[in-house]
Amino acid sequence: MDDLTQTLALTLGASWASGINLYAAILVLGFLGATGSVTLPAGLELLSDPLVMIAAGAMYLVEFFTDKVPGVDTAWDGLHTFIRIPAGALMAAGAVGDVGPAAELAVALVGGGVAAASHAAKAGTRVLINTSPEPFTNWAASITEDIGVVGGLLLALKHPVVFLALLALFFILLIWLLPKLWRGVRRVFGAVGRLFGWGRAEPAGSNPTAREFRSKDEPPDADSPDARAPTARKG
C-alpha cells in the first residue's frame, strides 16, 4: 500500500506540477534523482541526464522572466497549452513504470487531464491578474507558483498522503473556481474586443444593403418607415 501511495502521489504530482511550470518540475525531479535524494522510476530516470537538466534550466530562466511581464505571461501560457499538457501525460506515464501499454495509456490520459486542470487554473488566474496595471501581482503570482511546484513535488515524494489530501482539496476548489475564472476571462476578452471594435453588431432593424439596392420605382415594404409615413394631403 505504501508503494502504491508513493507511486500515485508521484504520478499525480508530476503531472500537476507540469501544468503549472514544466521546466521547474523537470529540474526538481532531475536534481533529486541525480543527487540520489530519491530513486526515480525507470520512466523518469532520463530527467537526471545532464543534457536534459541543462535544457530545462535554460527554459526555466526564460520562463522566470517572461512569466513576470503582464500580457506576455498570458501569451506564454497560451503557447504552453500545447507543451505542458502532453508533457504532463508523459511524466505521469513515466512515473508508473512498465505496467503494460493499456495501463500506461490510461495513466497518461489521467496525467494529461491533471496537467490541463492545473494549467487552466494558472492561465485563467493570470488573465484576471493582468487587468491590474501594476506588475507586482504578476511577480507575486509567479514566485508563488514556482514555490508551490517545488514544495508540492517534495511533499509528494516525502509525504505522499498529505500531498494527495491537498491535491483533492485543490480539485474541489477548482470545481468551484473554474466557472468564475471562465466568466472573468470572457469579460476581459470581451472588453478587449470592444476596445478594438471587434464583433460590433449592426443596430436592430437596420439593413443598409437592402436599402441601397432597392429600386426607386419599387414600392416600400409594408412594415418600412416609408410605408407607415402619412401621405401629404393635396390641397
Image: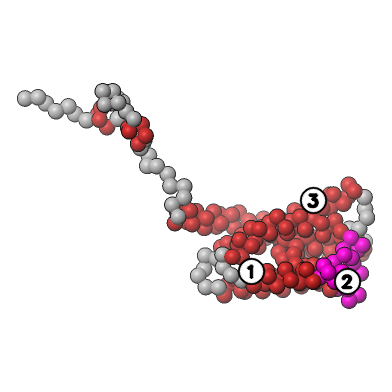
Name of the residue lying farthest toward the left: 235
**CA–CA distance in space, label 2 to label 3:** 25 Å
Identify residue type, mark 2.
Answer: Gly
> In what element is the residue under mark 3?
helix
Residue situated in front as seen by the camera: 3 or 199: 199
Quarter of image, res 177: bottom right
Looking at the rendered structure, which numbered label has been put on residue 67? 1
Label 2 Cα crowd, 10 Å radius (few <14 / some 14-19 / many 20+) = many
Magenta-drawn segment? 32-53
Residue 35 among magenta residues: yes
Question: Which residue appears at 86% of the width and 59% of the height?
Answer: 94
Circles 2, 1 touching at the beta carbon (< 8 Å): no
C-alpha span from label 2 to label 1? 27 Å
- Cα gap from disc 3 to disc 1, whole angstroms: 27 Å
Crowd around label 1: few <14 · some 14–19 · many ≥20 (10 Å): many
Disc sitting over residue 109 in the figure: 3
Above or below, 203 against 114 in this view is above
Q: Quadrant of the C terminus?
A: top left
Residue position marked by numbered label 2 in the rendering: 33
Q: Earlier in the sequence, mark 2 or mark 3?
A: 2
Tags 2 and 3 in contact by the CB under 8 Å rule?
no
Sequence order check, earlier mark of 2 and 1: 2
Query: Viewer-proximal residue, 34 or 95?
Result: 34
Q: Secondary structure at mark 1?
A: loop
Of the 4 image quadrants, the one containing the N terminus is bottom right
